[in-house]
C-alpha cells in the first residue's frame, strides 16, 4: 500500500498572482526537510502538495512532524493512495484504516470528488465507503453530527486517497515570502518566541546574539545555539551573528553612571543590530520585548532605545503576558532550553536601581563619555557568523 502526506495550504490561496511563487516556496521547504526522513517526492496539484515516499525505507511519522512545522501549510493528512475505483477503495479501507480507528467509537465519511468523470457522486461514494468502514471496523457506529473521526475519501486527478482525519498545520506564510528579519536572540524565553512568530508571517531569519565573554560563558553561548537549532525546525536555517560586547560593557562600567548601564547597553545592541541588518539585507529587527516586563522595557526605556533602529522593529510579544509567551515557548519546545540557568550579557553589570523612566537627554549625556559610533563599527566588524541548521 502506498502512503502519502497531503499538505493543504490556507491563507496563501488568497494571494492571486503570487500563488505559484508561494507554492514553489512551500514545495522547496518540504523537499529540504524531507531529506531527514527518507527519499520523498514533492509535487503539487489542486492546491495540495503531495509528499510521497519512494522505496520502503522512510519515516512517515518524522516527515509528518516536520511538515507540521512548515509555515504556510494549514492542514496535513496522512493518507493511503489507491486506484480510482470502489473495489480498490474497499481494499484500502480494510488494509489501512483499522489502526487509526482502534480507540474511536463513532465516525462519518466525507467524500470529495474533484474528478467529475468518476461514476459515483460524493454522496454515493460516502454512503458506500461508510458501509465498507462498518464492515472493517464493526465496533464503530455512524454519527454525522459529532463523530470521533471523519474518514475522508478524495477522488483526485490521478488517484484516490483514504484518510482518517487531518492534523492542523503550522499556519502562517511560507519561508521567506515576506523578506528577511534580524532577530535579537538572547538565551531567554521571549526572543525565540518572537522569532517564531515573525518567521510564521514569512520572514527568513538572521539572528544576532550578544555575548560578553568571560562574564558570559561558552555554555551560555552553546545554549543560544541550541535554541536557534530548535527554532530552525520551524523557521528554516538561521544565520547567527555573534557579537562581543565585553569591551563596550567594561567601558560603560568604567565611565558611566550605574543607573544607565542597561539603557546604554541596549542602545548599543540596537545600533549594532541595525548595522548588521543593513549588511544582511534584513528589512526589520525583531525583539522579544514585552511592555513593562522589566525596567528596560517600559515605554520610556523603549523610547530611548528605539531611535537607533533605522528600520521597523517588530516586537510580537509586546502585548503578551509572560504566561502567554510561555505557552508558545512550550509549544515550539524552546521553553526547557530557555530556562537553563546561564547568564546573559544583560545580567552582567546590572544596575541596582535602573532608570525606569529615562530621559533621552540624560542618556545622551552619558553616551557622550563613550565613543559610540566607533564602538558600534568595531563590534559589527569583529562579529563571528555561524549557519544554524535545524536540530531534529
Ligand atoms: P528574553 O526572554 O528574550 O531574553 P527578557 O525578558 O530577558 O527577554 P531583556 O533581557 O530585557 O528581556 O531583552 C529584551 C530583548 O532584547 C530580548 O527579547 C532580545 O530580543 C534582546 N536581547 C536581550 N539580550 C540579548 C542578547 N544577549 N543577545 C541578543 N539579543 C538580546
Ligand atoms: Mg533576556
Image (cartoon, rainbow, N blue to C red):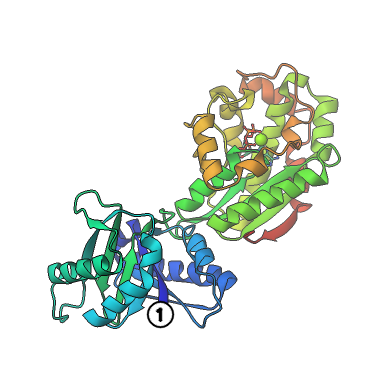
Specify the quadrant of the image occupied by residue 351: top right
Q: Is ligand 1 closer than 8 angstroms to the Cβ of mark 1?
A: no
At horizontal 75% and vertical 18% (from top left) the residue drawn is 352
At horizontal 78% and vertical 36% (from top left) the residue drawn is 371
Give coordinates of residue 103: x percent, y percent: 38, 55
Give coordinates of residue 285: x percent, y percent: 56, 45
Q: From the viewer's perspective, tell me whether residue 114 is left or right of residue 193.
A: left
Who is closer to the viewer here, 291 or 358? 291
Specify the quadrant of the image occupied by residue 297: top right
Q: From the viewer's perspective, tell me whether residue 120 is left or right of residue 94.
A: left
Q: From the viewer's perspective, tell me whether residue 349 is left or right of residue 169.
A: right
Residue 317 visible in the current orientation: no
When the figure is inspected, residue 367 is found, relative to residue 76, above or below; the finding is: above
Specify the quadrant of the image occupied by residue 81: bottom left
User: Disc 1 designates what residue?
Assistant: 1
Quadrant containing the C terminus is: bottom right
Q: Residues within 10 Å of mark 1 (few under 14, many from 20)?
A: few
Amino acid at each position: 500500500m502506498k502512503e502519502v502526506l497531503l499538505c493543504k495550504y490556507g491563507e496563501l490561496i488568497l494571494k492571486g498572482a503570487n500563488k505559484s511563487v508561494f507554492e514553489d516556496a512551500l514545495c522547496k521547504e518540504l523537499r529540504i526537510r524531507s531529506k531527514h526522513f527518507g527519499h520523498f517526492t514533492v509535487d503539487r496539484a489542486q492546491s495540495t502538495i503531495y509528499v510521497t515516499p519512494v522505496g520502503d525505507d522512510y519515516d512517515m511519522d518524522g516527515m509528518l512532524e516536520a511538515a507540521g512545522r512548515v509555515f504556510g501549510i494549514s492542514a496535513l493528512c496522512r493518507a493511503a493512495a489507491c486506484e480510482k475505483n470502489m473495489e480498490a477503495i474497499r481494499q484500502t479501507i480494510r488494509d489501512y484504516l483499522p489502526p487509526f480507528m482502534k480507540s474511536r467509537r463513532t465516525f462519518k465519511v466525507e467524500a470529495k470528488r474533484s474528478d467529475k468523470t468518476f461514476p459515483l457522486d460524493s454522496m454515493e461514494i460516502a454512503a458506500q465507503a461508510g458501509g465498507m468502514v462498518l464492515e472493517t471496523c464493526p465496533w464503530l457506529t455512524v454519527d454525522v453530527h459529532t463523530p470521533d473521526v471523519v474518514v475522508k475519501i478524495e477522488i483526485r486527478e490521478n488517484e484516490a486517497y483514504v484518510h482518517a482525519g487531518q492534523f492542523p498545520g503550522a499556519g502562517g506564510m511560507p519561508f521567506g515570502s515576506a523578506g528577511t528579519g534580524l532577530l535579537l536572540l538572547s538565551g531567554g524565553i521571549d526572543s525565540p518566541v518572537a522569532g517564531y512568530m515573525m518567521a510564521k508571517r514569512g520572514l527568513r531569519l538572521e539572528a544576532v546574539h550578544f555575548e560578553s565573554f568571560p562574564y558570559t560563558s561558552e555554555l551560555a553561548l552553546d545554549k543560544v545555539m541550541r535554541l536557534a537549532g530548535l527554532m530552525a525546525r520551524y523557521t528554516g536555517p538561521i544565520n547567527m551573528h555573534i557579537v562581543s560586547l565585553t569591551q563596550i560593557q567594561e567601558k560603560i562600567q568604567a565611565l558611566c553612571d550605574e543607573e544607565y548601564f542597561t539603557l546604554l547597553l541596549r542602545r548599543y545592541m540596537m545600533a549594532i543590530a541595525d548595522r548588521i541588518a543593513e549588511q544582511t539585507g534584513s528589512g526589520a529587527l525583531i525583539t522579544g520585548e514585552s511592555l513593562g516586563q522589566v525596567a528596560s522595557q517600559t515605554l520610556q526605556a523603549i523610547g530611548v532605545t528605539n531611535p537607533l533602529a533605522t528600520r521597523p522593529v517588530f516586537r510580537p510579544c509586546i502585548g503578551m503576558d509572560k504566561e502567554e509567551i510561555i505557552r508558545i515557548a512550550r509549544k515550539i519546545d524552546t521553553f526547557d532550553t530557555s530556562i537553563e540557568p546561564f547568564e546573559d550579557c544583560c545580567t552582567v553589570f546590572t544596575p541596582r536601581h535602573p532608570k525606569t523612566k529615562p530621559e533621552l537627554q540624560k542618556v545622551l549625556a552619558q553616551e557622550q563619555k563613550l565613543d559610540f559610533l566607533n564602538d558600534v563599527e568595531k563590534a559589527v566588524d569583529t562579529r563571528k557568523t555561524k549557519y544554524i541548521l535545524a536540530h531534529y
